[in-house]
Image: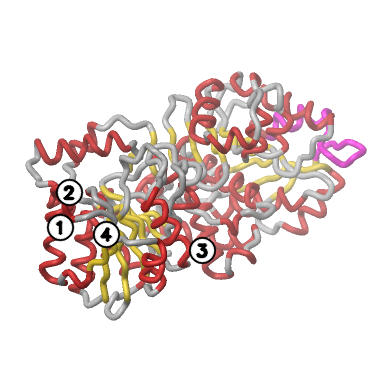
Amino acid sequence: MTKIITAAQMQALDLRTISEAHIPATTLMERAGAGVVSCLEQRWGPVRGKTITVVCGKGNNGGDGFVAARLLRRRHADVRVLTMTPTSELSRDAATMYKQFVRGAGKSSVYPYGSKAQAQALLQDSDILIDALLGTGLSAPVAGRYAEAIDSINETGCPVVAVDLPSGLHADTGTILGRAIRASLTVTFGLPKLGLYQNDGIDLAGEVALVDIGIPPAYIDSIQSRTTLITPHMVRTYLPKRQPSSHKGTFGHAGIIAGSVGKTGAAAMAAQAALRTGIGLVTVAIPTSVNDVLEAKLLEAMTVPMPETKARTLARTALDRLIAFMEARTAVAIGPGLSTHPETVELVRALTKQLDRPAVLDADALNALTGRTALLAACKTPPIITPHPGEMARLEADATPQTVNSDRMGTATRFARERGLFVVLKGARTVVARPDGAVAICSTGNPGMATAGTGDVLTGMIVGLLAQGVPSWEAACAATYLHGVAGDLAAARRGQAGVISRDLIEEIPYALKLMHQAPSSETDEKIWNDPM
């Protein structure tokens, strides 16, 4: 379990490591700089012959930059350092690392900041830039030469590596303090910072790599944080084992209540995604007149025709049959493609009162519960809901998609606590919250997944794991992470713009395979290179 922490918590960890574990600050700095170089080479290959400009501030962030510069020069990169302040103003440890760099490279490799024009000329003539300007302690808006330097870096269009945090980003809230670096890669140290996964941090951080700088595990264990990062190791431990003696009954039977005229695709994708997670059996309850259409789309899943309205949506008269349908299944999904026909809305509300087994509610099931969320708290088994920000705003009184997105963790956590259920708040860096206030953040996924039907795929994946006996929290976290991995694999194969939801379904088996190749322990995970 990888905790996500605040800047103050990280500062406390650093101080305790120095004072109690007697690890010098310069040793931590050395490890941080080495981590930057290692991650940079993993992303862009060997640095030999490449022109790399490191922009260093006066504090410890700048010190990390000086270490990285020295180590890059050892690897035969053409390294230049742009310093923002006179050497007399450097922090003690940063000054130590500055002297070590100059001892090897000479002062001719150091360029004191003179003007924006001078900085731009230096930066534009670079293959890669390293942002070591400002660290996690920033709390006031960036101004003066630091603001000019940030603008200059962003204007080059060069790949940028941010040291610990993109300069100008608030470490806790992820908001921009005046202006901020737009990084291609952020190499963060010890534990990931909250701001990297919230608000502007989602766009500005780029890829986030975590580097172990040697903080004792016992100190990390003592940090109180209810926010964690979903990791491959976590997902691997959550997935059901497949014994040689298994049969299809071993892996559960999911029931999916979905579909209406024009929306059988949503039901089909949810069913296919459930099957791809390893479930034994899937049956879809569908309005009678569109049953044949759905059967033509599905080979491995079964269907059950149900009473329908004149608009060819599920009718209120289907209630008793659907209750019996749910009772015969291990887990249930309700919502994809149901429509918001008034009679179907009434049916969904009645079904929600009867939920007594693991379930996931999505799409039109959530729309049906607008203004009636008390029904969710009445469920005998707490369900999983999977809203996007618009659906979340409709469920929460006085909320808008904008207010939801501005406080994604707070919104999801609050709703999960108040209603006693599990919330998967979809979007960039999907948030998973549970009734006791714990929250997990998913780092997988990409903008190519912003296309019709990916939510139906996630619903199918969650119910597929639930039906296999995976508990609700673990199923929500694992399915969300795997969904993002499948999206990343699809984007790598086809490019983000061309991804459609069926591509994700095809990649689910490969996402599962990757998880089984993941490290068997959290310690190993810190040095595991994600094969994606």
Determine whether the residue tagged by mark 4 lies in a helix, strand or loop: strand
Q: Residue at x 39, y 43 (%)?
A: 229
Magenta run includes residue 68: no
Determine whether the residue tagged by mark 2 lies in a helix, strand or loop: loop
- Whether residue 245 is visible, yes or no, is no
C-alpha distance separating marks 1 and 3 = 40 Å
Crowd class of label 3 (few under 14; some 14 to 19; many from 20; radius 10 Å): many
What's drawn in magenta, residue-wise?
Answer: 306-325
Residue 126 x/y as whole percent: 37, 73
Q: Nearer the viewer, residue 481 or 113?
A: 113
Q: Earlier in the sequence, mark 3 or mark 2?
A: 2
Q: Residue at x 39, y 49 (%)?
A: 144
Q: Earlier in the sequence, mark 2 or mark 1?
A: 1
- Residue 97 is tagged as 1
Q: Residue at x 18, y 44 (%)?
A: 215
Q: Is residue 15 left or right of residue 146?
A: left
C-alpha distance separating marks 1 and 4 = 13 Å
